[in-house]
Amino acid sequence: MQSPTADLRSQKNDANVQSIQIMRGIASILVVLLHTSIKWKQFGNNAFKEIHVGGSGVDLFFIISGYIMCFSTDGRQLNFIRFMGLRIRRIMPFYWLTTTIGLAIFLYNPSLVNSSGGETSIWASYVLFPTGAKYLNANGWTLSFEFFFYLIFAVFIYRGTDKAMRYSSIILLILVALSPFFIMDGFALNFLTNNMYFEFVLGMGCFYLFNRKGLRFASGYGIALCLTAVLLLVAEGLAYVPEIQAWRGFCWGIPMLFLFAGLLSMEGPIRRASSSVKTIFLGIGDSSYSLYLIHPFALSGLARLLKHFNAVSNPTFFVVALLIPTIVLGHLAFLYIRKTTDRLRQERDDPQNAGR
């Protein structure tokens, strides 16, 4: 029987690491639940205030990203331009598409975009430049953090994954250490020193421990880590302490680290398991990026539809009526839009192996 470490090392790309795909599915569902609760609150009901911990799905995505940047570049000859070109071609086409949808809605009726308030910047939306204004796709702010991490990682990637991992971690930890000194000193400094960058370091640390040092847990320990993560998040949800947001890189990053390490350590058992639940989460994981970017528009439209038919009185029905169709729409967007852009990208990056 293969060890979890061997199971990880045998994979050729991150889409084949089933524990990662499941975590992507979990992360995207958490974020959708958060925004569903926000829609419910806009109707004057705060019944789902505990679901604010759904925002921790973003923190899980950042840990996954730190790990995957190491995993996907390991053993490859890359430089700054090549690495950034691959990142841009993988991430930006579908984001630009959803941003353009947001622009069309914004031009038709600005109040329909970012209905929770705040200034919306069109130019910043397309280039992901953090100005403090909101983007046409409300979730674009997380991509600004992602690309800042990519830029730092890309500077050192010509020296190999290990050096890029080491120096990126050092720089990000220094920035995070400076964060307490810049909390009230403007958006730019807050962005550059945000403690959420700690989560990318956690992901890179997991790559070092699992893939370089061969760390592995027995399945029982992996399950215990996952349960600990759930209990911590439930406690934070019930406590509902607004100050958590100021330290979310730690308050949500640590529970998500436990979840990440727990599930990653169970890669072998997960691969050998056969269940409909696993299949569903793998499917959502495959379409997680599409779901993540399309769901603000889907939730807004569905919520307005329910309000039109006076079907917003039952909180459980409201959540189910928004969550399930949104997941389906996200998967359809993946199947018929994202996969097409990915295929075109692969043909450009590696025309000899395209379609294999």
Image: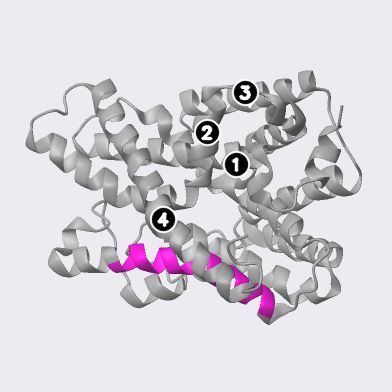
| Residue pointed to by mark 3 | 274
* Chain-order first, disc 4 or disc 3: 4
Q: Where is residue 229 in the image (x, y as percent from the top left)?
A: 64, 28
The amino acid type, in three-letter code, at marker 3 is Ser
* Disc 2 secondary structure class: helix
Q: In which quarter of the image is residue 192?
A: bottom right
Alpha carbon separation for disc pair 4 and 3 = 33 Å
Q: What range is drawn magenta here?
A: 82-100
Magenta span contains residue 92: yes
* Disc 4 secondary structure class: loop
Residue 281 circle label: 2
Mark nearest the camera among 4 and 2 is: 2
* Chain-order first, disc 1 or disc 2: 1
* Chain-order first, disc 3 or disc 1: 1
| Residue pointed to by mark 4 | 139
Alpha carbon separation for disc pair 1 and 2 = 8 Å
Alpha carbon separation for disc pair 4 and 2 = 21 Å
Residue 21 circle label: 1
Majority secondary structure of magenta residues? helix
Given contact means CB atoms under 8 Å apart, are the residues at marks 1 and 2 in contact? Answer: yes
Given contact means CB atoms under 8 Å apart, are the residues at marks 3 and 2 in contact? Answer: no
